[in-house]
Image: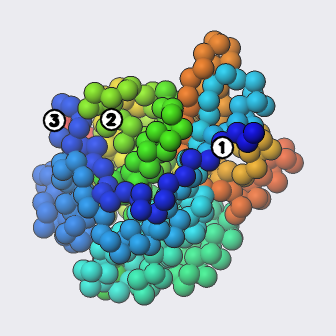
Amino acid sequence: MLERTKFLLDEKDIPTTWYNLAADLKGGPLAPALNPATGAPLSRDEMAHTMPEPLIEQETGTEREYEIPEPVRQIYALWRPSPLVRARRLERALGTPARIYYKYEGVAPTGSHKPNTGIPQAYYNKMAGKTGLVTETGAGQWGSATALSASFFDMTAKVYMVRVSFQQKPYRRALMETYGAVCVPSPSEETAVGRAILAEHPDSPGSLGIATSEALEAFAADPSLGYVLGSAANHVLLHQTVIGQEAIRQFALADDYPDVVIGCAGGGSNLAGLAFPFIGEQLRGGRPVRVLAVEPAACPTMTRGVVAYDYADTGRLGPLFRMHTLGHEFVPPPVHAGGLRAHGIGPMITRTVEDGLIEPVAVAQTRCFEAGVQFARAEGILPAPESTHAVRAAVDEAIRCREEGTAQTILFNLSGHGHFDLVAYQKYFAGDLEDDALDSETLALAAASIPRTVAV
């Protein structure tokens, strides 16, 4: 008799609303973003310079649910609901009594969870009269999602891609161009921010903060463009909650419920997308879950950073956010998990860490690839380098269960496939993949860029 491995929902089961964790957090509202010139909270009028009204409401509001527009749900139906899969072969390979599940977001057209927010952001900007989109991207998943979303709404797209990822991942670039986007390596000669950085550091590998500054500068120069972003912001995390909402319904089909929920963490979008609905259930009196946020040891925003008001971009063109940060001038080593090379985490993630709802964990690059290969050989799916961080933590938790003799249920977000990351796997097999160590002096120099004039 076949063992059930997939727990599937129908298209009619695609969530009709996004879930807002802010409605259930204890201890008051989230700290506001600040205007760096005045130190005052950003007004709605100031926010309106960079985002349409519905996104402002989703960014700042405290309603528990926001309706998903029907045109967005219709596009979601191309790949949603995504499957929940029981990793039985991995369980047997590990000899663990734990039950391991993963929510697989690699079924999206671009191969990751990013279109869950790319589609609504493009939709709202189109409704606001914008004819093009501009953004930044780390490893290229978000850039691919932006390119796809712009194409679906007959808009142009320009993507500033972190230079080291631009070089490491040519097929991500090719995918963006297939959808009609222009992809520019960052730092570039196209913007004042890029030119200034290249003048001082001609061989700069780039960073997400630098690419963000370039995208914001390009946006400010062209009123026909809408600026969109792929992680960290409240409305982005909100859009991703379709993942966790589906997972809760799928666990009912499995007659199970997670004890441990795991996501990799750069800006925080896939982690929040999976975990926030489960955390919300817990805060409203439901079963408790242990949530792990897994970040690279080479970019340890939560585990070695500080909580402070800081810029999300290196060029200081945007507002200040209260978040875990390594400093907006931090340039992480060129690890292959380019989507996790962010100096700051989403403010909502910071709040959940401070409230004891999420535990941050840092892991080294080679251990992540080791787990990614183990997962691929057991389950058949090659994870993206970012997702290997979640796989690593899931494997470690399963081993803990084996050693303790406990049969816990483990859920992780397999947020994307690694088909465009084979060069990184080749380097791993050749022994050329290194673990970059960050000394205290490097972190202290980066932390010195954090503004000290704003109280936390």
Q: Where does label 1 land, which residue?
A: 5
Depth check: give the residue in front, 200 or 357.
357
Which residue occupies 80% across, 44% down?
Answer: 377
Earlier-in-chain disc, 1 versus 2: 1
**Front disc: 1 or 3:** 1
Rendered location of residue 443, percent (x, y)? 49, 37
Earlier-in-chain disc, 3 versus 2: 3
Depth check: give the residue in front, 333 or 46.
46
**Quadrant location of the C terminus in the rendered image:** top left
The alpha-carbon separation of the residues under discs 1 and 3 comes to 41 Å
**Front disc: 3 or 2:** 2
Q: Where does label 3 land, which residue?
A: 28
The residue at the far right in this view is: 430
Which residue occupies 63% across, 12% down?
Answer: 404
Earlier-in-chain disc, 1 versus 3: 1
Say if residue 259 shows up in the picture: yes
Which residue occupies 33% across, 35% down?
Answer: 281
Q: Where does label 2 land, which residue?
A: 281
The residue at the far front in this view is: 1
Rendered location of residue 227, percent (x, y)? 35, 72
